[in-house]
Structures are given as structure tokens and as C-alpha cells.
Image (cartoon, grey):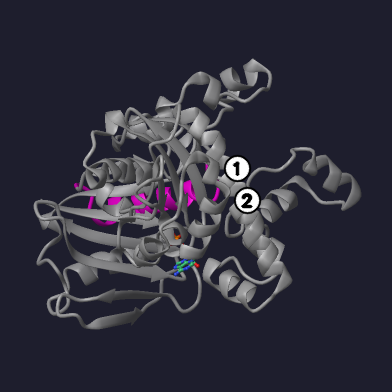
């Protein structure tokens, strides 16, 4: 059975076509600059030939059409006909109260649209992507896979904010979390890798990418996570501030004459590693420049690491203890520097780094990175959200 996985951003479309019997990736590509000048699709065909196709892509519909044309191209395509695709799975950041993935139906779609504001940067482009697939191939079943649904097992004391209760009743104001598809994959994979039943593992999983979050998973279920109503709460990220005193809004409105939307944009797009360093949101650049002595990059790294270590402590409380600390995501899977420095804060948990193992667990390699006599393990597990979808 062939399944197409689609991840739409505001100006991008990423896709992967899987043969589910073997988990083989039959085709993968990405379209950039949707709605802008100079749009293109990049892919590598089944002969290993790299392709870049430039085309006019004013909306997601043209992009999705180009994706299907490329998938079925007589020379470069992975399949002969769109009919070979059994279904499309869409990555959806915010799913509100949906606790499971859903086959898209008109009723389901109307209910989901009421959660649009929970991910204002991510949900609207996902809807555009779905509409575009529907416009090109009307009969293909579409499934929405929500980044929030894994977190629906959080207990009430973890997901409620300490604000008047009617705000939850009226507006659904609560913590929803994100990166749930990654956590679902990584928690299963960690148990498999360690040869344990996930029911017997208390895990703290740090998904560290350009967006970063952390979750406590025990008995195979999410107990708490760092992202909240939106993916802004929690850890320091590439461009997002993570936790901040909410009074920042009134303070900046009064002192800097900023509007709510300007402050929201600043916290989402101009903060985090980028804001602190004044250089970049890219962790590799930050690490390189910190090594060259750039003061902003050094501080950005230190705040990122310190906040992460603090959160590992609090998530250990939520998990009821710690058997496995798991690193995943672009930074978690590759940055031996960040992992080493975070573990440097956690010696009192009985975690001791194995330097050699830490250097080896990079670039897609899983591995335990703590010494054999550590009281718990720290482990690197590459995530695979598309396969999970
Ligand atoms: P993601 O959003 O999961 O794709 O992760 C992107 C982040 O991973 C970016 O900040 C990258 O700089 C970071 N990253 C990727 N490779 C490395 C590496 N070798 N060392 C440090 N950070 C890395």
C-alpha cells in the first residue's frame, strides 16, 4: 500500500511517498516559494538524478498539482498513476480536542476549523494543502494527523492553566502541546532500541529542532509537555522565546508602544537563538560562532542549554522518575556539544556522559550516550514523523 505524506507550510510543501509494506521511501521532494516569485520543486528521482523544476506557483493548488505531475512523470516519476496512492496523510500542528488522527469528512473539517487560531502560522497552510489535494484528486482519502493528539493523555493538573476556569470552558484555553507525532514515534522506538516494554519506561524526550519541546512519557502515555496553547511556550527555540512573563505584553505596549500582534510576532519570529545572538536561528551557526568567541552566540547557547536542563528536571517530576532521557530532532540528533553540556547539569540524577558514544551518536545514528554505571540512560533516537504519519 502506498501512502503519501504531505506537510504544508505557508510558502512550502514537503512530501514523501511510502511503500508501507517495506517502509521504503519511493519519492520525496519539497516545493519552496509557494505564492512568491521563483517557486521550484526539488526532488531526487528513482535513478538518483537530482531535479529542480522551476514553475509558477501562485497558490498551494499549483504546487500540489506539480507534486502529483512529478510523482507520475513518465521518466522521473515513482508511480504510473495517482490511483496507486491509497491515501494522503497530512501533518497538522494543532488538532484541539482531537485525540486521534482523523479521516477527513465535511463534519470533521468544520469542527477542526474551530481550532484554527491555535496554530495561526501552521494550520491555515495545512488547510490550503488539503483543499489543493481535494481539488486535484477528489476521491483520495485524506487523513489529518495532529501534532497535539499524543498529548491528550496529559492529566488535568498538567494541561490546565491557573486562570479563571470559564476561559477553558468557553474558549478551550489550555495546554495542548505539539511535536506529538514525533513523540509517538520516538517513545516506541526508544523502547524497541533499549529492548524494554514502553509500559516499564519513564522517559523524558527532548525534541530539539528549530522548534523545540520536551515531554514526559510514562507507561507509554504523555504526562506533560513544554508547549502550551500554541507552540510558543516552553524551551528556547530557533526564533521563539519559549517561556516568558506574560506581563511582557503590557510592559512593551506601554514602554515600546508595540501592538499585541507586533509583540506576538517578535516572540515567535525574532526571539530565541536568533534574538539572543543577533546572528542566526540556526544552531550550527550559533555553535560555530560561539566557538569563535562571539558573545551573543555563547550566551544564546548557554540560555538554550540551561532552560533545557531545568525542563528535564521538571519533566522528570511529571514522569515520576527517569529511566531514559531521549534526544531527538535536528539538534538533539546531531549536537554532541549541547547534549554534553546539558548532561553536565544532570550529574546529580546519576547521568554520566560517555564522550566517545556521544560523538558517535550523530547523523542518523541512534545510541546510548551515558556510561554503563549511570543510574538512567541518555539515548539519541532519530525521529521519523513522516513514517509515523
Ligand atoms: P529540525 O527543525 O529538526 O530540522 O532541526 C533544525 C536544527 O538542527 C537547526 O538549528 C540546525 O542548525 C540543527 N542542526 C542540524 N545539524 C546540526 C549539527 N550537526 N550540529 C548542531 N545543530 C545541528
Is 376 on the left or on the right of 245, as rendered? Answer: left
Which residue position holds label 1? 310
The foreground one among 151 and 117 is 151
Task: Evaluate if marks 1 and 2 touch, with contact meaning CB atoms under 8 Å apart.
Answer: yes
Q: Nearer the viewer, residue 34 or 245?
A: 245
Tell me the crowding category of disc 1: few under 14, some 14 to 19, or many 20 or more residues within 10 angstroms, Cα based: some
Percent position (x, y) of residue 194?
Answer: 26, 44
Direction right: furthest residue: 255
Whether residue 117 is visible here, answered yes or no, is: no
Left or right, 240 with respect to 159, comes to: right
Q: Is 344 rendered above or below residue 44?
A: above
Q: x, y percentage for residue 143?
A: 28, 42
Q: Is residue 368 above or below residue 155?
A: below
Residue stretch in magenta? 119-139
Indicate the position of residue 91 as horizontal and vertical percent values. 36, 48
Tell me which secondary structure the magenta stretch mostly adopts.
helix
Residue drawn at (50%, 77%) of the image: 37
Q: Nearer the viewer, residue 179 or 249?
A: 179
Q: Which mark is residue 306?
A: 2
Front residue (pair 173, 364): 364
Tell me the number on the disc at residue 325: none
Q: Determine the secondary structure under disc 1.
A: helix
Q: Say left or right for 4 vs 254.
A: left
Amino acid at each position: 500500500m502506498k501512502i503519501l505524506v504531505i506537510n504544508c507550510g505557508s510558502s512550502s510543501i514537503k512530501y514523501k511517498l511510502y511503500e508501507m509494506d517495506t517502509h521504503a521511501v519511493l519519492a520525496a521532494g519539497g516545493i519552496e516559494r509557494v505564492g512568491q516569485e521563483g517557486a521550484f520543486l526539488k526532488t531526487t528521482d528513482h535513478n538518483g538524478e537530482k531535479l529542480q523544476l522551476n514553475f509558477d506557483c501562485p497558490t498551494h493548488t499549483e504546487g500540489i498539482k506539480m507534486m502529483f505531475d512529478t510523482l507520475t512523470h513518465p521518466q522521473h516519476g515513482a508511480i504510473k498513476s495517482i490511483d496507486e496512492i491509497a491515501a494522503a496523510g497530512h501533518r497538522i500542528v494543532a488538532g484541539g480536542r482531537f485525540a486521534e488522527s482523523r479521516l477527513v469528512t465535511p463534519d470533521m473539517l468544520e469542527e477542526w476549523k474551530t481550532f484554527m487560531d491555535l496554530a495561526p502560522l501552521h494550520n491555515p497552510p495545512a488547510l490550503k494543502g488539503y483543499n489543493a489535494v481535494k481539488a486535484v484528486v477528489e476521491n483520495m482519502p485524506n487523513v489529518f494527523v495532529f501534532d497535539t493528539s499524543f498529548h491528550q493523555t496529559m492529566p488535568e493538573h498538567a494541561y490546565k492553566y491557573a486562570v479563571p476556569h470559564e476561559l477553558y470552558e468557553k474558549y478551550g484555553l489550555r495546554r495542548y502541546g505539539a511535536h506529538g507525532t514525533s513523540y509517538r514515534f520516538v517513545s516506541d522506538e526508544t523502547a524497541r532500541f533499549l529492548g524494554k516494554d514502553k509500559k516499564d519506561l519513564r522517559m523524558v524526550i527532548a525534541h530539539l529542532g528549530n522548534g523545540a519541546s520536551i515531554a514526559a512519557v510514562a507507561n507509554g502515555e504523555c504526562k506533560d509537555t513544554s508547549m502550551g496553547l500554541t507552540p510558543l511556550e516552553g524551551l528556547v527555540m530557533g526564533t521563539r522565546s519559549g517561556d516568558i512573563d506574560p506581563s511582557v505584553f503590557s510592559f512593551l505596549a506601554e514602554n515600546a508602544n508595540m501592538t499585541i500582534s507586533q509583540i506576538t510576532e517578535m516572540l515567535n519570529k525574532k526571539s530565541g537563538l536568533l534574538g539572543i545572538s543577533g546572528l542566526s536561528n540556526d544552531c550550527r551557526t550559533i555553535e560555530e560562532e560561539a566557538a569563535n568567541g562571539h558573545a551573543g552566540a555563547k550566551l544564546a547557547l548557554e540560555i538554550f542549554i540551561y532552560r533545557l536542563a531545568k525542563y528535564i528536571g521538571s519533566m522528570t517530576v511529571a514522569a515520576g522518575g527517569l529511566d531514559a532521557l531521549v534526544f531527538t530532532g535536528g539538534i538533539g540528533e546531531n549536537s554532541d556539544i549541547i547534549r554534553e553540556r546539558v548532561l553536565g547539569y544532570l550529574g546529580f540524577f546519576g547521568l554520566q556522559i560517555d564522550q566517545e558514544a556521544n560523538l558517535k551518536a550523530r547523523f542518523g545514528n541512534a545510541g546510548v550516550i551515558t556510561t554503563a554505571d549511570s543510574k538512567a540512560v541518555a539515548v539519541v533516537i532519530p525521529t521519523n514523523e513522516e513514517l509515523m504519519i
